[in-house]
Amino acid sequence: MEKKNLTTASLRLVPPSATDATAVTAACQDPEIQRWVPIPVPYTEADGILYASAQCDDSWADGTAAIWTIRSGDVFAGIVGLYRIGHGAADLGFWMVPDFRAKGLLTEACTAVLDFALAPAPAGMGLHRVGWNALAGNRGSARVAQKLGFRFEGTARLAAVGRDGLEDDWGAGLLAPDDRTVQPWSILA
């Protein structure tokens, strides 16, 4: 798959490159990212270099993932991506640097990715479904998915590997024809 930049009113979404390794490494020292995102801990500069260059490049090249850095101006603010792309579907994953949280920027970035993912080809990827999963208890991620219009589909018991072993996994889905309005989620009530 060919790499593609996306833009919003206030953000640029750009595929990661080796020059992002230091910013990715710094962000991945955050305890919240380490708690909820399946990354190595400790997260080293070597991990950042591998992720920002080889892993992301390979994923774009083989079509299994499309990953973007989120940039506010020229400042690295986070990561958003489509993972496990195949058979007309993908999973949305994202995280944000602490200084950029709670400002609506992650929802803005994810909206641009969903617009691209669900738009018919050739303007978009023509996906039929985008899924979302998070370890149960990750209310911040759940609130973003809810704002994006995902429909909560349930809790899979001990279905995800967390930092200390198996944990419950929340799941939601968004279909191309869905209206993307905010949905009621019982776990956020």
Image (spheres, rainbow, N blue to C red):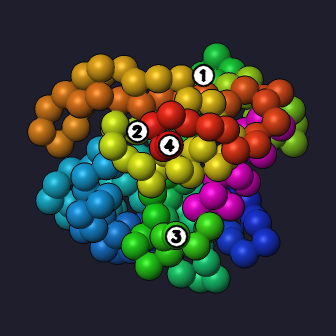
Residue 161, image quadrant = top left
Q: CA distance from mark 1 to mark 3?
A: 32 Å
Q: Amino acid at mark 1?
A: Gly
Task: List the residue tagged with mark 3.
Answer: 102
Mark nearer the viewer, 3 or 2: 3
Q: Earlier in the sequence, mark 1 or mark 3?
A: 1
Please, what is the three-letter code of the amino acid marked with disc 3?
Ala
Q: Considering depth in this image, is 99 or 152 the residue closer to the camera?
A: 152
Q: Secondary structure at mark 2?
A: strand
Q: Nearer the viewer, mark 1 or mark 2?
A: 2
Query: What residue is shown with label 4?
Result: 189
Q: Say the numbered circle drawn on residue 134.
A: 2
Classed neighbour count for the residue bearing mark 4: other residues with Cα under 10 Å, few (<14), some (14–19), many (≥20): few
The part of the chain drawn in magenta is 106-119
Mark number, residue 105: none
Mark 4 and mark 1: Cα distance apart in space: 33 Å
* Residue lying at 68% horizontally and 69% vertically, measured from the top left: 12
Which numbered disc flags the more N-terminal residue, 3 or 4? 3
- Quick one: label 4 or label 1, which is nearer the N terminus? 1
- The structure residue drawn at horizontal position 47% and vertical position 49%, both measured from the top left corner, is 141
User: Could you tell whether 15 is left or right of 139 in the image?
Assistant: right
Q: Is residue 64 visible?
A: no
Res. 41 image quadrant: bottom left
- The amino acid type of the residue labelled 4 equals Ala
| Residue denoted by label 1 | 86
Is the residue under label 2 in contact with that under label 3 (CB below 8 Å)? Answer: no
Q: Is residue 4 magenta?
A: no
